[in-house]
Image (tube, grey):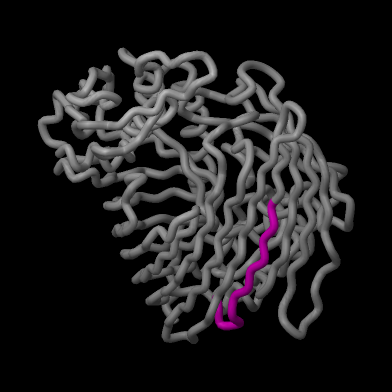
Amino acid sequence: MKRVRMNRRSHLPGITAAIVFLTIGCAFCCPARGDARSASQPTGELPAASPGVVKMLTLEAVEPHGNTRTSLAVIERYLGLSPGARLDQEDLLEAVARLRESGLFDAVDYFTRPGRTRGALVLVLEVEERGPDLRLGTGNSDLDGWYLIPAALSLDNLTGRGEQAAVQLMIGYRMAGLTAHYRRGAAPGDRTFWGAEIRAFASERVYFEDGVEYAHLVSRGGLSLHLGRRLGRGWSLSAAVQLETADADSTGTVWRDDDVSGVTQGDEVPFAELPEGIAAGVGERERTIWHTDLVLDTRSPERRAGSPAAGLWGRLRLGYTLQKEGDFPSGRCDLRAYRSLGSGVLGLHGRAAYVGAEAPFYDRLYLGGLYTVRGFPSQSLSAPSGDEWLCQGSAEYRAPLLGDAARPRLVGLLFVDAGRSGEPGGPSGRVAVGAGWGFRVRLGWLGYLGTDFAVPLSTSPVDESFHGHVSLGWSF
């Protein structure tokens, strides 16, 4: 087993905090390129219809101007329209909006003119090609939560085939990394999609023991390939393979001071003092990971309180990891539902997950924190080595407090979370429940930044009357 000595004190928390404050400042000062595009106003419209009558016309042709690289076929794919399509004013506006949001062009304007036959029209597009540029952004991953993208070199549509490509620096909550991806098949009319990604990142996996919070540095990197197909009515099916090297440090650190135990943040936990489940996972592992995803997405494009106004999103993922130390299966079912209620949106979230006994601690399941049960510190409700199964559910009501009802500047929320985890055939913890309130503030391209305050309604491993969480976007 390979054991690697790392720096006694990690600099990830300090770097992350600096990037967060710098990025928030930029969000107030720098307009987003995407905002500029969406502000473009249509320069033409369909002929007016009589009151109460929907004017349906036939698209005779699409005539783009200014597209030096992008072919007409690619433009039609992103519009979701082709000659012969029947459309009305709303269809036209939605199609142009899709083209603007695709990121293929810096600017998109349009007008219409009559076609050669009665009831036909020609859609004329004035576009400005986009070249490589630097962007800012945000993201979210199941494993590490939210993260910022303080620098990204976008290479979208560089060959004119509608591809998505970028190199991104990620700085997040207890993690940092670098990724490069290439994807095809993102247009609304594309049935097949595929892509590749190279990724290298490090994260501090947090665990609790005897009420003390510890962190363990894990580095991971590799190449992944995926291929999928849209099945219609919101369904899609995909498969992926990932070649990965994972390396867990041979020592840990104390994450927070604890006067009772007499430890101080940054103190090293040598290998001999690591919990058994953590010690078993240290060192380098070469792995091949397979997984298949079945996804349902019927979420409405209409927004309310910054969320989908209606619809479902669900994913069933089945996976298998091959490694010299022992293979293991994994599975996860995740379902999210949204429904308009009064002036806001009611969101419901349910998740069940399983992982095999041979999984190292950084692949196992942990309960507690922003993405499972709020009101408890992150991962504090599971054993240090993690759990093999987990069930969790949340209900959250989001309401606009200030600004436009669809994308308000300030959103308030009320929530209740519950969850339970454990090991097959072994003891499991009691159901953990937390409830509370929170706020989200919209900050330009940064999206929604907020805080949640939750009260634990069941036994907590730490002596707290409530626990606060910082969130970039929503927890689901």
Nearest to the observer: residue 99 or residue 328: 99
Q: In this view, does 432 lie to the left or right of 179?
A: right
Vertical order, 404 against 84 (above or below): above
Q: Does the magenta stretch include residue 357?
A: yes
User: Could you tell me if residue 336 is visible in this image?
Assistant: yes
Query: Hey, which residue is sitting farthest front in the picture?
Result: 118
Q: In which quarter of the image is residue 333?
A: bottom right
463 or 330: which is nearer to us?
Answer: 330
Which residue is nearer to you in this view: 121 or 41? Answer: 121
- Residue 53 shown left or right of residue 275 in the figure: left
Count of residue discs: 0
Residue 463: x percent and y percent? 86, 50
Q: Main secondary structure of the magenta part?
A: strand
| Residue at the spot 61% in from the left edge and 50% down from the top edge | 312
Is residue 198 in view?
no
In the displayed structure, 276 sits above or below 193; it is: below
Horizontal and vertical percent position of residue 476: 62, 47
| Side (left or right) of 138 relative to 75 | right
* Quarter holding residue 428: bottom right
Residue pictured at 75% horizontal, 34% vertical: 341
In which quadrant of the rendered image does the N terminus lie? bottom left
Q: Which residue is drawn at 60% across and 25% down?
A: 406
Residue 266 in percent (x, y) is at 60, 52
- Residue 268 part of the magenta-drawn span: no
Would you say 346 lies left or right of 335 here? Answer: right
Residue shown at 53% from the left, 80% from the top: 329
Residue 83 position (above or below residue 325)? above
Expressed as whole percent of the image width and height from the top left, the position of residue 165 reads 26, 46
Q: In this view, does 178 lie above or below 407?
A: below
Q: Quadrant of residue 114?
A: top left
Bounds of the magenta segment: 349-359
